[in-house]
Image: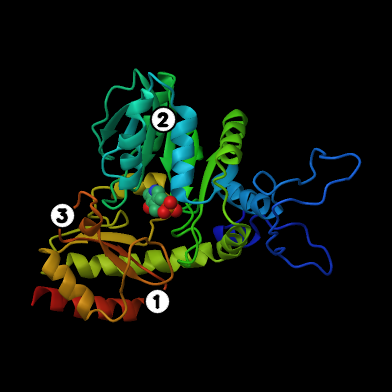
Amino acid sequence: MPLGDGTRAVHAGLPAPVPGRPFLPGPVPAAPYHLDPVAGPQPGVDGYGRTDNSTYRALETAIGQLEGGECVVFASGMAAVTAVLLTTLRSGDTVVLPSDGYYLTRVFAAEHLPERGVTVLTAPTSGPYPAFDDVRLLLLETPSNPGLDVCDLAGLAAAVHARGGLVAVDNTTPTPLGQRPLDHGADVSVASGTKALTGHSDLLLGYVCTRDPQLAATIRTWRARTGAVPGPFEAWLAHRSLGTLDLRLSRQSANASAVSDVLAGHPAVRSVRWPGRPEDPAYGLARRQMRRVPGVVTFTLADKAAVDRFLDASELVFAATSFGGLHTSADRRAQWGDNAPEGLVRFSCGIEDTADLVADLRRALDAARA
Ligand SMILES: *Cc1c(COP(=O)(O)O)cnc(C)c1O
């Protein structure tokens, strides 16, 4: 019988038990390691920290098990996303990015890809998509951030593969317990581990997963050349945090369900998106494709002033960007230059008690309306 998510998360990447050793060995901070003074560098023996580190390897084993592919960890989500773009795209290629996805991916592409001869197209997550004839790479983000639209991974992957292109999926918002893009035909799952994957709002991390050994090797070499490695302590902390991933996601998702119901019934709220609501346009697709729905809910209040009143009145919701952490937080996306309506809030449910969160939310929404 396949193991459940909680079991897989707790055991992911742990070494075999050795009496007297910890369950998860501590971080190995090393720039150089001892070399054999006579034989010099040897295959399989760690030599230098930018390429070799047992703490990264353990974390890569863990994430690779959850995603179902080979994993390469990076210093941040952006280090991972840019590694995918810059290793797969050549002059003359075309890339399609989500027009409604994580905005810095688009910003990076606009700043750096055209001058390298790459044509950058965008498409909304829910479509329509351009013809894939000349597309080298389709990058998808589902659910998209912050709009929470969902796209059909298997269908799009088949269409792109038929024309010889690659498909990468930004899996940050769902995490590998919420969605396994490689199982749906994607060539690459790329993500920020800064968000729900590690969930404690105390580190930056990124990763790339793939089942293509050639691509994994290319990405690993890219990381070694650019030096975009995480710190060993961050990598260890991330691995330690993975053990509670299933528990955290379960509570976040339960909170999001309750929160989206309150939002949908409140007169201060103009619109709500959460793919776990049967009324949501993405519900059917999310049910087929996702293993669980994340704790992020996006809603719109009248304007900036209404969001200000909402945040001021709330006692439990932290004003903060990022999402997926233990603490419920809200981010008015327009303040980041993310092309969003002034009153749009990305609301990230933490793991507080649902009743407390709902009571606080009601109070804050009433104040937003006043
Ligand atoms: C945050 C985020 C990133 C970038 O990750 P960092 O760890 O902040 O570099 C990429 N994609 C999505 C969907 C994100 O939410």
Identity, as a three-letter code, of the amino acid under mark 1: Glu
Please, is residue 318 above or below residue 79 in the view?
below
Q: Earlier in the sequence, mark 2 or mark 1?
A: 2
| Label 3 beta carbon within 8 A of ligand 1 | no
Q: Position of residue 104 (x, y in %)?
A: 33, 46
Q: CA distance from mark 3 to mark 2?
A: 31 Å
**Residue designated by label 2:** 157
- Characterize the local packing of mark 1: few (<14), some (14-19) or many (20 or more) Cα atoms within 10 angstroms: some
- Where residue 354 sits, quadrant-wise, is bottom left
| Nearer-the-camera pick, 357 or 73 | 73
Identity, as a three-letter code, of the amino acid under mark 3: Pro
Specify the quadrant that holds the C terminus. bottom left
**Residue designated by label 1:** 352
Q: Secondary structure at mark 1?
A: loop
- What residue appears at the point 39 percent right and 37 percent down from the top-left corner? 153
Q: Which mark is residue 341?
A: 3
Q: Which mark is residue 21?
A: none
Give the farthest residue toward the left. 370
Please, is residue 242 above or below residue 340 in the view?
below
Disc 3 to disc 2: CB gap under 8 Å: no
Give the farthest residue toward the front. 37
Mark 3 or 2, closer to the camera: 3
Q: Is residue 107 visible?
A: yes
- Characterize the local packing of mark 3: few (<14), some (14-19) or many (20 or more) Cα atoms within 10 angstroms: some
Q: Earlier in the sequence, mark 3 or mark 2?
A: 2
Q: CA distance from mark 2 to mark 1?
A: 38 Å
| Label 1 beta carbon within 8 A of ligand 1 | no
- What residue appears at the point 32 percent right and 67 percent down from the top-left corner? 320
Q: Position of residue 169 (x, y in %)?
A: 42, 40
Q: Is residue 291 visible?
A: no
Q: Secondary structure at mark 3?
A: loop
